[in-house]
Image (spheres, helix red, strand yellow):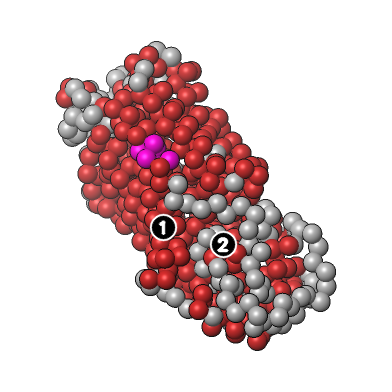
Amino acid sequence: MAKNQLGVLNALDAARTQWYHFTAIVIAGMGFFTDAYDLFSISLITKLLGRIYYHVEGDPKPGTLPPNVAAAVNGVAFCGTLAGQLFFGWLGDKLGRKRVYGLTLILMVVCSIASGLSFGKSPNGVMATLCFFRFWLGFGIGGDYPLSATIMSEYANKKTRGAFISAVFAMQGFGILAGGIVALIVSAAFDHAYKALPYNSDAAGSTVSEADYIWRIILMFGAVPALLTYYWRMKMPETARYTALVARNAKQAAADMSKVLQMELEIEEEKVEKIGTAPSNSFGLFSKEFARRHGLHLVGTTTTWFLLDIAYYSSNLFQKDIFSAIGWLPKPETMSATHEVYRVAKAQTLIALCGTVPGYWFTVAFIDYIGRFTIQLMGFFFMTVFMFALAIPYHHWRSHHAGFLIMYSLTFFFANFGPNATTFVVPAEIFPARLRSTCHGISAAAGKAGAVVGAFGFLYASQSTDPSKTDKGYRPGIGVKNSLLVLGAINCLGMVCTLLVPESKGKSLEELTGENEDGGNEIQQSSTTQTVPV
């Protein structure tokens, strides 16, 4: 246990699981539900956007988004997310977690609605407006990463901290699932209300004019869960670790946590001041001392998240292309526009149900028993195995769709019962309170840089090596098989970089960061005025 720990922080570390823990999980988790819904719902509608805005009269195939437009639509939100993670991560350490928390939610609500209202006189004008609002949507989403992780980390007890942070992140799985379900309901409703023939039977009539509402409704629905939690997010008190260790306000920290824990806590002003001025709490992010203490840790958290997101987002965003390539989805010309949305959403929902959602909750269940390091190493290992198992006998899977679905689902299962969860958890635990949000933002931004690489790179790389089989406007790529081999190699490299990440299971945050290690004889250990429940 860390020396000289403040009584209020001891109380939080030792507190039994209480109602406020679950409240914090839901409040922070609904932000992640919204994040995932907004980021991944775009993959459900890109084919529809191509049909509506880039149809070519007389073409034997439905319209598709031009390569540069497709790259922008898929990737611009990640660019905004990257910027938001860096900015709000830094701001969360400067102004406090709570003061910034509501701003990110407002930005998400406004930009979700605005994305659905995208307008323009030309197809490129509509896409430009959509990209503008999705960038700022991503900017708001980016802020949610470091703030939600840091808040949950600083509220949790040390025994179940990993499960609580993982549970916040696990809401991402439900967000992905909700996106598929909303798309299924909306597309089925429109398909029933406005009958349309397949493209090869009636090219112009296969995309009814009302189909333009489908993608707008799907995108705008992302504002609903964020709106529902705004009030409760604003009611949350600032975390005691920020108030005591960064703002150095012992009285406010004790008052806030007394209400949360429903117990009396001693105000330790002298102790807070001494801890705040100790050498272990004075070095900055760009100092030699930070590099000595946490430099390799930051390299580990950034590289593993970067590598993970290349594989994770390229696989998630382009599921529809992979499903089409193996023949699981019918050819576009054999479907109407609304029915194609339905089939893409159905496939994505099945993957989410079979692999994505269960993987998240396996992490929640086991992270505080087998540890972050083991789960991350295991996850990267099995992702590597299943990527190679998909790629090497790739042509076999083209006639065995059920087998491909199982293998592909297992890849997502071990991504989420693995590095996709742990890369989010660990940076919220191993850095000092005054730099915690910033370092988590840097780590998360590295991940989104990987997502950008995956979003833009896979779009081109997965094109067929045969020029006659590429999508319109694309040059030949290396094919889906070779792309999967590359992703397998990236996952393998992730295993190596995991060796730089420390295990944080069962330790207090101050023990991990060394914030209370100085002046052991100067400060007498204080205790709370009531026994802390365990």
In the drawing, what numbered circle is on residue 296?
Answer: 1
Name the spot of residue 194 as percent of width and height, x first.
44, 31
x and y, in percent, of residue 153 in the image: 59, 60
Identify the secondary structure beneath mark 2: helix
Q: Is residue 460 left or right of residue 526?
A: left
Q: Which residues are magenta?
A: 490-495
Q: Secondary structure at mark 1?
A: helix
Q: Is residue 372 visible?
A: yes
- Tell me: residue 515, above or below residue 55: below
On whether residue 455 falls in the magenta region, the answer is no
Query: Which residue is found at the position 30% from the left and 37% from the top?
Result: 458
Q: Is residue 124 left or right of residue 383?
A: left
Q: Which residue is found at the position 49% from the left and 40% from the top?
A: 377
Tell whether 85 sits left or right of 273: left
Mark 1–mark 2 distance (CA, rounded to whole Å): 14 Å
| Residues under numbered marks 1 and 2 in contact, where contact means CB atoms less than 8 Å apart | no
**Disc marking residue 512:** 2
Compared across the picture, whether 161 is left or right of 392 comes to right
